[in-house]
Image (spheres, rainbow, N blue to C red):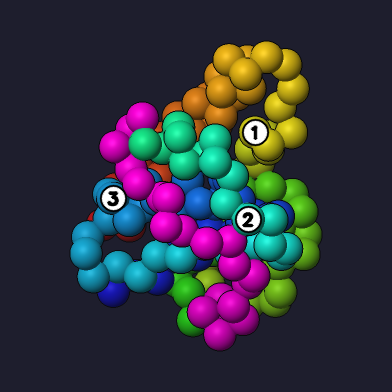
Amino acid sequence: MPQLYFLCTGNSCRSQMAEGFARQMAPQDWRIASAGVEQHGLNPLAVKVMAERGVDISQHQSKLIDNDYLQHSDMVVTLCGDARDKCPMTPPTVVKRHWPLPDPAQATGSDEEVLAVFRQVRDDIEGRVKDLIQTLS
């Protein structure tokens, strides 16, 4: 039973979306979680754009990295440079992947322009998670 961990800076957008897609796509017996090097709270726009894909992350909570979960993960995916750089050491058996994605929470412009950035990042994450699940299955 694979154990995946998605990490980002504040566990508010990118890692939450990755966790949501992975939970939807992976076999039921997989252990999947997300966390951040900080806690920023769940971004409501991440919830909104995930709902557009039929994935409900509204009950997710922003969490800090759990070192025990990290040490026992099969794969850790960092979704930003901050998480990659600040991620605690892991045993050599833990496979690490890095997806350098822009932070949609930093998007500026009109409401529609900001939502467009969230959707673009969501779609990128969806494709990456799909490929990851297929590779590990």
Q: Could you tell me residue 86's position as x and y percent? A: 77, 64
Q: Could you tell me residue 52's position as x and y percent? A: 36, 30
Magenta range is 52-71
* Circle 1 Cα neighbour tier, 10 Å, few/some/many (<14 / 14–19 / ≥20): many
- Is any atom of residue 60 visible in this view? yes
| For marks 2 and 1 on the same chain, the one whose residue lies earlier in the sequence | 2
Residue 41: mark: 2
Q: Does 31 lie within the magenta span?
A: no
| For marks 3 and 1 on the same chain, the one whose residue lies earlier in the sequence | 3
Q: Amino acid at mark 1?
A: Pro
Front-most of residues 117 and 83: 117
Residue 104: mark: 1
Q: Nearer the viewer, mark 2 or mark 1?
A: 2
In this picture, is 16 found above or below 104? below
Asked if residue 118 lies left or right of residue 10, the reply is: left
Q: Could you tell me residue 55's position as x and y percent? A: 33, 43
Residue 24: mark: 3
Asked if residue 18 lies left or right of residue 118, the reply is: left
Query: What's the residue at 74%, 49% (across, down)?
Result: 81
| SS for callout 1 | helix
